[in-house]
């Protein structure tokens, strides 16, 4: 079942997620910029949806991000 923005045909493909990780470094530049080693250890247990002004950030089928409250979302009818 698909979700969409209420009163529109805009389909929501999912939520924007925040996942913490440790980017491994092999040094530091003179200006303080890290030199990355090319690997990030991801902490999947930290995964959570992103918020803006207390609303979940959704991603549309056109890859646009939009913050919506639950009352702005509806189930799309089956085609």
Image: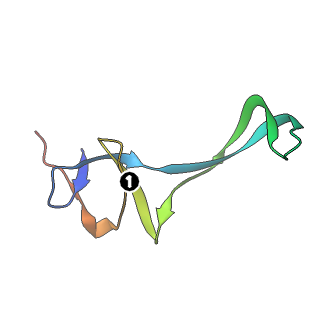
Query: Which element carries disc 1, helix, strand or loop?
Result: strand
How far across and down, in percent of the image, does residue 62 sit?
30, 41
Q: Image height check: is 60 above or below 50?
A: above
How far across and down, in percent of the image, does residue 1 sit?
24, 44
How far across and down, in percent of the image, does residue 17 sit?
51, 49
Q: Image height check: is 52 above or below 64?
A: below
- Residue at horizontal 75%, vertical 39%? 23
- Residue at horizontal 89%, vertical 42%? 30
Q: Relative to residue 57, is residue 17 drawn left or right?
A: right
- Identify the image quadrant of residue 71: bottom left
Q: Relative to residue 45, is residue 34 drawn left or right?
A: right
- Residue at horizontal 72%, vertical 35%? 40
Camera-nearest residue between 37 and 72:
37
Q: Image height check: is 24 above or below 20?
A: above
Q: How are the residues colored?
A: rainbow
Camera-nearest residue between 2 and 56:
56
Q: Image height check: is 68 above or below 12?
A: below
Camera-nearest residue between 53 and 44:
53
Which residue bears the numbered disc 1? Answer: 58
């Amino acid at each position: 079942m698909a979700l969409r923005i209420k009163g529109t045909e805009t389909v929501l493909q999912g939520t924007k997620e925040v996942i913490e990780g440790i980017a491994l470094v092999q040094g530091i530049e003179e200006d303080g910029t890290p030199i990355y080693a090319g690997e990030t250890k991801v902490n999947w247990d930290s995964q959570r949806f992103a918020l803006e002004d207390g609303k979940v950030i959704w991603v549309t089928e056109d890859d646009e991000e939009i913050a919506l409250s639950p009352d702005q979302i509806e189930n799309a009818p089956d085609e």
